[in-house]
Image (cartoon, rainbow, N blue to C red):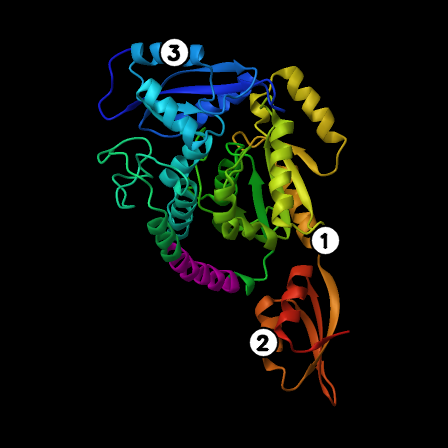
């Protein structure tokens, strides 16, 4: 196993394959994703992982007594500090397993929360993670909190001083949640101001969405020349990033890189990050970036579509699928993917790393964001100065002429701009 590295936590990953449960994914692929999640935390030394097949979950301990003893002996031999269970673990199960194995234990939700805490950079992201973690901790006795103050960077699940187990104080947690909500509301107001400022820019918004590690940040960097952290790692980026980009045909757009999605995303995180994900709802075009080389790419697609549906994305918002990582396919796989993509108008087989297929993809992006524009005629009263100024700020005015009753303005704009104009409450669209 090698010498223990100073400051690292030796971890072991278990994927319970419960026969009674309905699983879309194969057990081995589930384990591989869980191990990849664990590798996303630099302080973890992932010693190994295994699939444990169960006829059913035991209410008090998840596993049977024989399997608990067998695993306990292995953990003791390998000097395991932390066991990661790829699935939900009840507070009772967690307490009993920690006692039986004399190790700390994290379930899938706890691990994802820890990763999000490690990745959050903006004030909003940090507050959202803290709120999600508190909601998760509210019903548990854990070793992560002392008077609800952090003992180290991150959320404190994995290690650090102050590991005394204490009884969770629900009242203190509720007070903490109230305080965080007040802070977050101030940050959200600032985000709304930024969004309003962006609304004055007449550029269409193109949102990149997809399963985590599908290559969104690599594509974002290639298109913008930005230096967004991009690595072959789950949740390499967390906070949304937006940049103005000029496409090869001269079309200007705003490109938005969002947090990656994942299967069984904790409900606490979905609720907390809704404000961030709602950036997608304002998009003129949604680009679904998929890792076409992944063995479960179709299941990942379903997970992403499910989250998008939950956000209430307008069905009329155009979408493109970018089948990314074509460079990782073998010759037969590449030919098969190319044939499948060619049969659909909304799909492009690409590689953000090598640039394969990006020219046709970007041309399609430009076509879709410009094809949405339509011409309208607006009747303004002389007193409607605010509306007239907004139209010129947007750069949508084709011409205008004065009449006896006011001003007639010819515009060419997107549906999103039309809806924003209606919110001003001035002028009449003919």
Disc 2 secondary structure class: helix
Span colored in magenta: 180-197
270, 40: nearer the viewer: 270
In the rendered image, which residue does mark 2 sit on? 389
Disc 3 secondary structure class: helix
In the rendered image, which residue does mark 1 sit on? 371
Looking at the image, which residue is at 57% across and 47% down? 207
Q: Is residue 115 toward the left or the right of residue 306 in the image?
A: left
Q: Using a 10 Å C-alpha cutoff, classify the residue at mark 3 as few (fewer than 14 neighbours), some (14 to 19) or many (20 or more).
A: some
94, 311: nearer the viewer: 94
Which is closer to the viewer, label 1 or label 3? Answer: 3
Badge 1 or badge 2: first in the primary sequence:
1
Residue 319, picture quadrant? top right
In the rendered image, which residue does mark 3 sit on? 69
Q: Is residue 253 toward the left or the right of residue 166 in the image?
A: right
Q: Can residue 259 be seen in this view?
A: yes
């Amino acid at each position: 196993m090698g010498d223990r590295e100073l400051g690292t936590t030796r971890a072991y990953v278990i994927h319970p394959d419960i026969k009674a449960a309905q699983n879309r994914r194969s057990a081995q692929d589930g384990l591989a994703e869980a191990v990849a999640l664990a590798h996303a935390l630099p302080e973890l030394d992932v010693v190994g992982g295994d699939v444990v097949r169960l006829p059913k979950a035991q209410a008090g301990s998840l596993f049977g007594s024989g399997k608990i003893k067998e695993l306990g002996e292995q953990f003791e031999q390998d000097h395991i500090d932390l066991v990661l269970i790829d699935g939900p673990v009840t507070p009772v199960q967690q307490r009993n397993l920690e006692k039986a194995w004399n190790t700390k234990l994290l379930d899938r939700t706890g691990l994802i929360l820890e990763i999000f805490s490690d990745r959050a950079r903006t004030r909003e992201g940090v507050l959202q993670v803290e709120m999600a973690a508190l909601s998760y901790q509210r019903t548990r006795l854990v070793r992560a909190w002392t008077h609800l103050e952090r003992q180290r960077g991150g959320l404190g699940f994995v290690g650090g001083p102050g590991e005394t187990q204490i009884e969770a104080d629900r009242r203190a947690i509720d007070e903490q949640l109230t305080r965080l909500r007040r802070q977050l509301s101030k940050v959200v107001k600032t985000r709304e101001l930024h969004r309003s400022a962006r609304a004055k820019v007449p550029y269409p918004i193109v949102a990149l969405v997809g399963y985590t590690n599908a290559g969104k940040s690599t594509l974002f960097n290639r298109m913008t020349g930005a230096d967004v952290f991009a690595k072959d790692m789950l949740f390499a980026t967390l906070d949304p990033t937006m940049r103005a980009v000029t496409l090869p045909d001269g079309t200007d757009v705003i490109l938005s890189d969002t947090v990656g999605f994942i299967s069984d995303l904790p409900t606490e995180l979905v609720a907390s990050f809704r404000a961030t994900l709602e950036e997608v709802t304002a998009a003129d075009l949604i680009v679904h970036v998929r890792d076409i080389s992944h063995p479960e790419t179709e299941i990942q697609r379903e997970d992403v579509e499910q989250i998008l549906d939950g956000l209430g994305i307008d069905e009329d918002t155009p979408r493109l699928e970018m089948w990314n990582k074509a460079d990782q396919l073998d010759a037969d796989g590449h030919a098969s993917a190319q044939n499948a993509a060619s049969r659909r108008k909304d799909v492009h087989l690409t590689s953000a790393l090598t640039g394969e297929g990006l020219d046709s993809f970007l041309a399609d992006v430009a076509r879709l964001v410009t094809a949405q524009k339509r011409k309208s005629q607006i009747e303004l009263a002389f007193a409607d100065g605010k509306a007239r100024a907004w139209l010129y700020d947007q750069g949508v005015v084709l011409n205008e002429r004065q009449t006896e009753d006011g001003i007639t303005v010819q515009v060419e704009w997107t549906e999103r701009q039309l809806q924003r104009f209606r919110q001003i409450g001035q002028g009449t669209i003919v």
